[in-house]
Image (cartoon, helix red, strand yellow):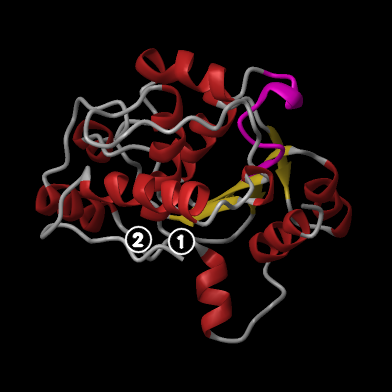
Amino acid sequence: MLEYSLTPEHPFPCQLIQAVAALRYLLLDKELSVEDMILGGDSAGGHLILSLLTHLISPSPYAPSLDLQGRQLKAIVLVSPWASLSWPQAQQLPSAKGDYLTRTAIEHFYLMAKEPTDDIWALQCEKDKLLSVWKQLYPGPPADSISQKLILAVGDLEILYESCMDFGQEILGLDVVHVCDPQELDLTRQLNYVLAVAPGEAHVQPALDCAVGYDNGNMLRSILGFLGTC
């Protein structure tokens, strides 16, 4: 697990630099196999994974480039990813009555962090800027994609729901599954690239479930089922 630095003391791209350094360490120093690696993150950590993948195709000037030499990661796991660090997008977020994460809190985070608004590594939802990059990462055929499998899990009550849906459908082209019964949960095990929508669940719901010892949440079960096939 990467213990990356936090804003506002360490603003972006500090976290991207650390993530690239961590992956380079695992690949070059520890000589771990790309094919055995599962990269995952939730919320801002999910954004960091997206930034790291973007860096593989379009290297950021802040960190050394990293070439996987055509090899595929085993899987990518994104849990309620914060897909964009754009202040205009933060202002356009809808109110989400069922989520503990509020628009006011998100606006506060943006203003406090003073994140960049023009770096593509920070703006994963900017379709015009990044679509070509993501089409290189996930062109369609599984054999040509950067990872063998990918899951993006989101709750339909969370404030980031629409941005996650837009990113998963419009940019990644994922198959959408509403995980609310056993048959649909099985689909998360069968599909290689899936957008798992958990009805009635909030931002990073598995963290809340685990905190109270509840292991029957649909988002949590969809992620565990997906990982069980990796």
Q: Is residue 164 visible?
A: yes
Q: Picture coordinates of residue 217 (x, y %)?
A: 67, 69
Q: Secondary structure at mark 2?
A: loop
Residue 223 is a magenta residue: no
Residue numbers of the magenta segment: 140-151
Quadrant hosting residue 45: bottom left
Q: Is residue 81 visible?
A: no
* Residue found farthest to the bottom: 213
- Which residue shows up at 40% across the image and 19% down it? 130
Q: Residues within 10 Å of mark 2 (few under 14, many from 20)?
A: some
Residue 98 image label: 1
Camera-near label (1 vs 2) is: 2
Residue nearest the observer in this picture, 193 or 148: 148
Give the Cα separation between the discs numbered 1 and 2. 9 Å
Quadrant hosting residue 13: top left
Residue 101 image label: 2
Quadrant hosting residue 144: top right
Please indicate whether residue 207 sits to the left or right of residue 38 in the image: left
Q: Amino acid at mark 2?
A: Leu
